[in-house]
């Protein structure tokens, strides 16, 4: 059974979806810790409610990004996880941190990457007049939101849609797709090789994606 550390900054609806799929025995894994950079993150309460160690490492008490990431790494290493899941973790990680866990960090980003890296993705997609938008799960590499994409999910953008409505629909997709990708990783059916996401070639057909 694989062990997972989840990093987050806010609500934690993706965390909840993962917790739920593990408790339904859809994912053969254990979340060994949830770490937030903000003590007000609701995701910490979700973790506590599920009996998972919930830890806050407040970024405002560190002088530099390097110091913060060093502390984060030593905390993570105490749990010796197979996988680090970023679930709404709103801080940029240093290359040193990322390289230390090569092929073992997944992120979910609310856009159809490589479009709209960074923030305000929903508003930017609306402002650009795009007809579709969505979310991407990708391996994390030192390039911000630039690591190899594993899976994307699309939603249409309707006329007169505001960013919040669009975000809600994207997040509904996220809660479906992220647990699925984590399940694949935990079954050793997904790996990062030479900076590419490599899936067991039966997966997409099985899951109805191909
Ligand atoms: C999600 O929509 C996720 O894609 C986004 O934050 C939200 C977190 O929601 N992540 C990023 O923007 C990463 N740069 P949650 O806390 O309810 O899971």
Image (tube, rainbow, N blue to C red):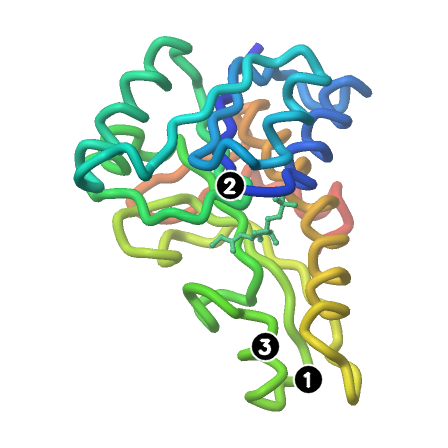
Residue receiving disc 1: 131
C-alpha separation, residue under disc 3 versus residue under disc 2? 20 Å
Residue receiving disc 3: 123
- The structure residue drawn at horizontal position 75% and vertical position 41%, both measured from the top left corner, is 206
C-alpha separation, residue under disc 2 versus residue under disc 1? 29 Å
Q: Where 105 sits versus 138, above or below?
A: above
Instruction: Classify mark 1: residues with Cα within 10 Å, few (<14), some (14-19) or many (20+).
Output: few
| In this picture, residue 30 sits left or right of residue 63 | right
**Callout 2: SS:** loop
Residue receiving disc 2: 9
* Badge 2 or badge 1: first in the primary sequence: 2
Asked if the beta carbon under badge 2 is closer than 8 A to the nearest atom of ligand 1, the reply is yes
- Picture quadrant where residue 105 is located: top left
* Badge 3 or badge 2: first in the primary sequence: 2
Residue 1 picture location, percent across and down:
58, 10
- The structure residue drawn at horizontal position 26% and vertical position 23%, both measured from the top left corner, is 71
Q: Nearer the viewer, residue 123 or 102?
A: 123
Asked if the beta carbon under badge 1 is closer than 8 A to the nearest atom of ligand 1, the reply is no
- The structure residue drawn at horizontal position 72% and vertical position 47%, both measured from the top left corner, is 205
Asked if the beta carbon under badge 3 is closer than 8 A to the nearest atom of ligand 1, the reply is no
**Callout 3: SS:** helix
Q: Are marks 3 and 2 in contact (CB under 8 Å)?
A: no
- The structure residue drawn at horizontal position 34% and vertical position 40%, both measured from the top left corner, is 193
């Amino acid at each position: 059974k694989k062990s997972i550390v989840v990093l987050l900054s806010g609500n934690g609806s993706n965390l909840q979806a993962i917790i739920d799929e593990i408790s339904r025995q859809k994912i053969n894994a254990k979340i060994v810790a949830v770490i937030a950079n903000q003590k007000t993150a609701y995701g910490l309460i979700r973790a506590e409610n599920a009996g998972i160690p919930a830890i806050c490492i407040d970024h405002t008490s560190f002088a530099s990004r390097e110091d913060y990431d060093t502390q984060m790494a030593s905390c993570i290493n105490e749990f010796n996880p197979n996988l680090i899941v970023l679930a709404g973790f709103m801080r940029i990680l240093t290359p040193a941190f990322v390289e230390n866990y090569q092929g073992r960090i997944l992120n979910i980003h609310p856009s159809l990457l490589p479009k709209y890296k960074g923030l305000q993705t929903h508003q930017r997609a609306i402002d650009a007049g795009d007809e579709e938008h969505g979310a991407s799960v990708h391996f994390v590499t030192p390039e911000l939101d630039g690591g190899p994409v594993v899976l994307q999910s699309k939603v249409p953008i309707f006329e007169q849609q505001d960013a919040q409505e669009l975000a809600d629909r994207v997040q509904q997709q996220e809660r479906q797709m992220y647990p699925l990708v984590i399940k694949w990783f935990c079954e050793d059916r997904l790996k990062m090789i030479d900076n590419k996401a490599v899936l067991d070639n039966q997966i997409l057909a099985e899951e109805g994606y191909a």
